[in-house]
Image (cartoon, grey):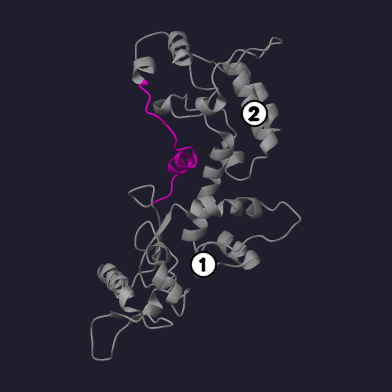
Amino acid sequence: MICSLLETKRKGWSRVKDNSWKFSHPTYFLSLFTIPVSVAHRIEKLQRNFLWGGLGDVAKYHLVSWDKVCSPITYSGLGVKNLILFNKALLGKWLWRFGTEEDHLWRRVIAAKYGLEWGGWQSKPCRGSHGCGLWKSISMGWGAFWEKIEFFVGRGDRLRFWVDKWCGETSLKDLFPLLFSCSTNREASFESVLSRSVLSTSWDWNISFVRDFNDWELLVVMSFFRFLQPFLVRNVRKDTMTWKLRSSGKFDVRSFYCALQSSNRTIFLWKSIWGVKAPRRISFFLWTAA
């Protein structure tokens, strides 16, 4: 159905006068379902053939690789969306909402059906070998999505002290692997490693290890506690999930899509081609030759 719709729409596409052919994506469907690879390839084939003038019976040569066409304009591409990556970025919105909309009905239904991982930020994997449930396909994107997540510590009851990224872009288990390996509870919550005596108004770290440290390891231990000192604050607010690709901490599809694209890019002087006052056909010709 999607391909048939685009087949109809392509009659109104214009390769050089506007960008309609670049953005004729079934965004609504892509934001709900995982697009089959075969369907993505078929849609991209329509776009490739149109770009190179091959909609008729005569096949035309493709002068530039499709990967380059899908690169941003600033990186020598045309900014055409890679459908599979764009689909993953759109579905990332649901993963973000799952972690932030704790009390919403749809989220509670999924949590009841599949269960929750530690802290309740994400659902457990959908283990069933049969069926093609909506959440089953969406949840396959947890891996790439989770790499872009950081946390702001509140009460600390939903954050793992060693494992979760609450102190920057790297977790404590990766920053201090020696101490992590010696910890008595590697899944301890942030809340559980804080303590305060009855008479004291300040908090202190209460981290236990399976053994005493050797003399040559004490430097690492001292560095560890110096690193933790600025975080020795107890907050009454809830722990929150933040999107590290934006200064606002809020998820957006564009930043996720850009992160999913290849990082092996070289800056392209795109303004010298697309920013000049020249017919689009001329600019397009210069781009193919660049």
User: In this figure, what is the number of numbered marks?
Assistant: 2
Residue pictured at 28% horizontal, 91% vertical: 198
Is 144 located above or below residue 159 in the figure? above
* Mark pair 2, 1: CA separation: 37 Å
Identity of the amino acid at label 2? Ile
Which residue matches tag 2?
A: 43
* Residue 254: % across, % down: 45, 40
Is 225 located above or below residue 275 in the figure? below
Q: Residue 120, labelled with which disc?
A: 1
* Residue 40: % across, % down: 64, 34
Residue pictured at 60% horizontal, 54% vertical: 139
Identity of the amino acid at label 1? Gly
| Residue 212 seen in the figure | yes
Q: Which contiguous range is marked in magenta? A: 250-270
The crowd level at tag 1 (other Cα within 10 Å; few <14, some 14-19, many 20+) is some
Quadrant of the snapshot with the C terminus: top left
Residue that extends furthest to the right in the rendered view of this protein? 130
Element marked by disc 2 = helix
* Residue 162: % across, % down: 42, 69
- Of residue 9 and residue 208, the one placed in the foreground of this image is 208
Is 112 located above or below residue 22 in the figure? below
| Residue 161 seen in the figure | no
* Residue 224: % across, % down: 31, 70
Element marked by disc 1 = helix
